Image (cartoon, grey):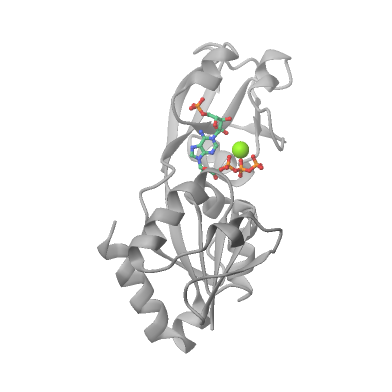
Amino acid sequence: MLTIALSKGRILEQTLPLLKKAGLEIAAEELNSRKLILDTNLDDVKVVIIRGTDVPVFVQHGAADMGITGKDVLLEHGANGLFEMLDLGIAKCRLMVAAKSENYQQGNILKVATKYVKSAKKYFEQKGQPCEIIKLYGAMELAPVVGLSHCIVDIVDTGNTLKANGLIPLDHIEDISSRLVINSASFKTKNAAIKSWVNAIEKNL
Ligand code: PRT
Ligand code: MG
């Protein structure tokens, strides 16, 4: 039995066609049901559809053998207990610094609002910029507008969300896309099955 953890939301929409091309299908009735563990067209493969941030947690602890989630999420989680096997090239975006203007810093300590605490810390540390990270869970764009922070670190795609809130994208931190991750123990114990899925997915990218 193989369990695959998928991120719900925008990543899922782009994941299902990839899996279908690799030979794995989830019936619409399953997807639309309230079940948390979904059956697939294959008796020995089950799927769980969860928050993207929970995917590396399930995979790290072996509750899922494989998973698909954003690189932004993986950078925050760290690589403990899992391998990043494939860049799926879906749900592409950029992790960026954004602010009201280029001269966003006031004082010696930069106030940064973000949900990407680890990535933001690492980025400003490497620049030698002392900063205070203010952890938010959403609506980061609001923070500089209401004076909560000097800048934000957030995902940017079209840039429309920043623009709508009077912010401009400034520094590029990382290119983001969704990745296939594998539980490190499963990679040994279920090696043949996992390898054949990785190959089937990769072949059809
Ligand atoms: O919203 P919730 O907390 O429930 O879940 P989620 O936000 O984790 O799920 P979802 O469906 O939004 O998917 C998030 C994942 O998709 C991220 O982890 C990224 O890997 C990837 N991704 C790709 C994006 C975007 N593009 C994206 N544009 N995630 C978020 N956004 C948001 C961004 O946070 C900002 O608010 O879209 C806005 C910016 O978009 P533009 O086009 O206006 O620049
Ligand atoms: Mg979202």
- Residue 179: quarter of image: bottom left
> Quick check: 156 left or right of 116?
left
Residue 160, horizontal then vertical, whole percent: 50, 19
* The N terminus - image quarter: bottom right
Give the residue at x 51% y 63%: 26
Please indicate whether residue 82 sits to the left or right of residue 88 in the image. Answer: right
In the rendered image, the quadrant that contains the C terminus is bottom left
Q: Estimate the x, y position of residue 81 in percent, counting from the top left.
A: 56, 72
Give the left or right position of residue 138, taking residue 75 as reference.
right
Residue 97 place in picture, x, y as percent: 52, 28
For residue 85, side relative to residue 199 (left or right): right
Q: Position of residue 73 (x, y in %)?
A: 56, 50
**Considering depth in this image, is 55 or 148 the residue closer to the camera?**
55
Question: Residue at 64% across / 74% down in the picture?
Answer: 63
- Foreground of the two, 181 or 143: 181
Image point 71% across, 38% down: which residue?
Answer: 137
The tally of labels here is 0
Quarter of the image for residue 56 reads bottom right
110 vs 36: above or below:
above
Which residue of the protein is positioned furthest toward the front in this rendering?
29
